[in-house]
Image (cartoon, rainbow, N blue to C red):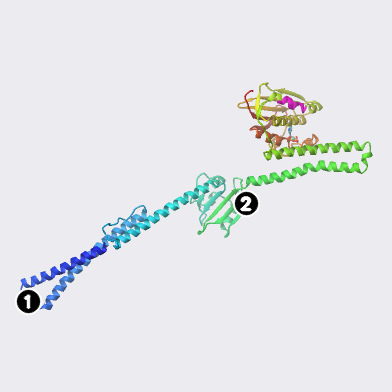
Amino acid sequence: MIQRVRLQLVLLAAALSLLAVVISRFVIHAERIELSSTGELVVVTLIVFGIALAAGLVAIALVRRQLRELVEATVQVARDPDLRVPIDANAPRDDEIRELSEWVNFLAKDATKSHAALAREKVLLSAVAEGLNQGVIAVDAEHKIELLNAAARQMLGVSSTPVGEPLIEFMRVPAAFELLEADEAASAEVQLPSGQRTLIRVARKWGSEGRVLLLEDVTTMRRLETVRRDFVANVSHELRTPVAVIRANAETLLAGAKDDPVMAPKLIDGLHRNAERLARILADLLDLSRLDAGQYRLELTTVRVKALTEQSLTAVETQAAARRVTLTVDIPEELTVEADPKALDQILVNLIDNAIKYTRAEGHVWVAARIDDEHVRIEIRDDGPGIADKHRVRLFERFYRADPSRSREAGGTGLGLSIVKHLVETMDGEVGVEPNTPQGSTFWLRLPRSPTP
Ligand code: ADP
């Protein structure tokens, strides 16, 4: 465009100069002005110079107007890279304004592409961050939040993403801020105000002063570690006594007591009782480990509750008779549940056996069942001393006993109720314990009803 304007102006200036020469000669002759040829030349030169100057000024004004238009169009594009600078299609390819306009459009197109790519990456990044089980927090150099994914929001108990707010407002954990101040990547296990044990790892953000915090909830892991440690300690403790008794009795027998008609039967009886106890502990441990490993195969079928309960009672009748405990069964004939008969028998024997063991001598044990919505509720009640609140809440834990010496004396392993709970839950049921009125305990379980066959 500039070139075209320039060419037009040069042609115009040449034409005007020619015209000026003709006019000046005409004027000189018409007015009969006597001028030397040098004077004539000066006049013509001045007129030509004047015309050329005027043409130059017009050309500059025109180019300035075009540049102004280009600047305004460029500003619009800078504000909205989707816009484009208009191109004069008639201008030659090497016209500077056209070239400049094309480059501005090229840069705008490039910026649009980069914006789109950045937006895609941002969406991808936040989708990945949102989907992570780990909490992710990104902060700037002043510890103001830039990103807080769903897991982090949940851990900190925040419902929205407070971008731009100081992290300290939402995470009052001094140890975490010590990590943020560290020059290198660092980690620490902390307790969040919610009580969760959390492993925090802090990494520098690439190319900036900000930091990224990764939060991992290790509460369950730590609890399981404690449970496992306690379990091993409890097993060793449980095995120690019978093993010690067996060893001591055997050693005494070997040392000569085997020939003592009074001592020998007592020592052998001790051997037998403690060997039985070891066998019971091992059997319960085996059941638990099979249940934990999912190897305890349950086959759910329709089970008549009354018939099965009567069968279970045969296993405890001798013991009930020994303690002169009265057993009463109150179960409607037609009641059926969806259960594994072997597992349900093990559950009932365990609960009825406990009721007989822990109720008072000459006490009473009731086994009752009734429909409870889509379930059947089975209750085993006794009128014994009952269980204190503080014990009741922990009774289904492995090796937990309300009265350890009573339990051991009665041949208990402390594992029965934890096996019961595992079995009931594996059959989609629930189990619990509550006080019986006026005295004693009520152990209950709910199992899914099944239609009468
Ligand atoms: P144990 O082998 O010791 O009987 P369980 O797991 O079966 O182990 O029971 C755990 C503890 O619960 C028992 O040691 C006892 O203290 C308490 N318990 C269970 N049933 C009763 C009950 N019917 N009355 C009072 N205490 C009970």
Residue at the farthest top position: 333
Membership of 311 in magenta stretch: yes
Image quadrant of ligand 1 equals: top right
The quadrant in which the N terminus is found is bottom left
Cβ of mark 2 under 8 A from ligand 1:
no
Side of 118 relative to 195 (left or right)? left
| Among the two numbered marks 1 and 2 on one chain, the one whose residue lies closer to the N terminus | 1
Majority secondary structure of magenta residues? helix
Locate residue 180 relative to residue 360 in the image: left or right. Answer: left
Observer able to see residue 3:
yes
Look at the picture and state if 317 lies above or below 245: above
- Residue at image position (74%, 26%) is 311
| Residue wearing tag 1 | 34
Q: Which residues are magenta?
A: 308-316
Position of 18 relative to 188 (above/below): below
Quarter of the image where the C terminus is located = top right
Q: Is residue 394 above or below residue 318?
A: below
Dot 1 falls on a residue whose secondary structure is loop
Residue 292 image position (x, y, % from top left)? 68, 40
Q: CA distance from mark 1 to mark 2?
A: 110 Å
Indicate which disc residue 339 carries.
none
**Residue 268 point in image, percent of width and height:** 88, 37
Q: Which residue is mark 2?
A: 189
The image quadrant of residue 202 is bottom right
Q: Residue at x 44, y 52 (%)?
A: 117
**Amino acid at dot 2:** Glu
In the foreground, 411 or 304: 304
- In the rendered image, is residue 399 in sight? no
